[in-house]
Image (cartoon, rainbow, N blue to C red):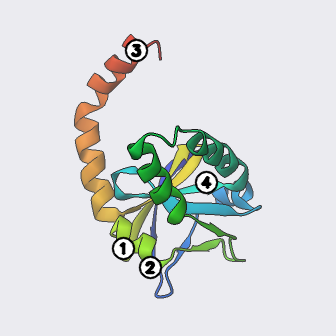
Amino acid sequence: MFLGEYKHSVDAKGRVVLPSRFRDDLAEGCVVTKGQERCLFVFPINRWETEMTQVSELPRTNARNRQYARSFFASAIQQDLDKQGRVQIPQNLRDYAGLGKDIAVLGVSDRVEIWDAAEWLQYNNEADEAYSSIEEALSDQGI
């Protein structure tokens, strides 16, 4: 399980150091792809297989499903962490997420998210404003 918020940076070669507590779960490799709200998702390989199956099972007769699957899979890249715990983020994914030098690395249960630090701060501030109403809506759904 991935938890917490960490401040890191992207180096000149597009590498990101992942938090040491995440590395054991990513030791077998990971897949980096586009996430929602213009962040990046980092899935451990075993979790990627589940995600891949779920997206692949969406009906192809639906144009939105096809569009989502194309974007999700075409942008995905399998990576291994190097000895320093870094993962390489390709330029197209850095562009998609608007990653500058300063980033936020988040543990979000079954995945890691990588955000531009300023974008994360803005998003998180807005989300904090709605947090209690979201919690109430989730409790209405039995969560």
Mark number displayed over residue 43: 4
Q: Residue at x 46, y 88 (%)?
A: 12
Q: Nearer the viewer, residue 72 or 90?
A: 72
The reply to whether callout 1 and callout 2 are in contact (CB within 8 Å) is yes
Secondary element at image label 1: helix
Q: Is residue 99 visible?
A: no
Task: State how far apart marks 1 and 2 are (Cα).
Answer: 6 Å
Give how far across and how far down residue 2 sits, in percent. 59, 47
Between marks 4 and 3 in the image, the one whose residue lies nearer the viewer:
4
Task: State left or right for residue 2 relative to residue 45.
Answer: left
Q: Residue at x 51, y 43 (%)?
A: 60
Q: Say which quarter of the image contains residue 71.
A: bottom left
Q: Is residue 21 above or below residue 135?
A: below
Using a 10 Å C-alpha cutoff, classify the residue at mark 1 as few (fewer than 14 neighbours), some (14 to 19) or many (20 or more): few
Give the residue number, with chain letter if any, for mark 3.
139
Task: State left or right for residue 36 relative to residue 15.
Answer: left
Q: Residue at x 33, y 19 (%)?
A: 137
The reply to whether callout 2 and callout 3 are in contact (CB within 8 Å) is no
Q: Amino acid at mark 4?
A: Phe
Give the residue number, with chain letter if any, for mark 1.
95
Dot placed on the residue nearer the N-terminal end, 2 or 3: 2
Task: State how far apart marks 1 and 4 are (Cα).
Answer: 19 Å
Give how far across and how far down residue 100 sits, in percent. 34, 75
Q: Amino acid at mark 1?
A: Asp
Dot placed on the residue nearer the N-terminal end, 1 or 3: 1
Task: State how far apart marks 1 and 3 are (Cα).
Answer: 37 Å
Task: State how far apart marks 4 and 3 are (Cα).
Answer: 28 Å
Q: Amino acid at mark 3?
A: Ser
Q: Amino acid at mark 2?
A: Gln
Give the residue number, with chain letter if any, for mark 2.
91
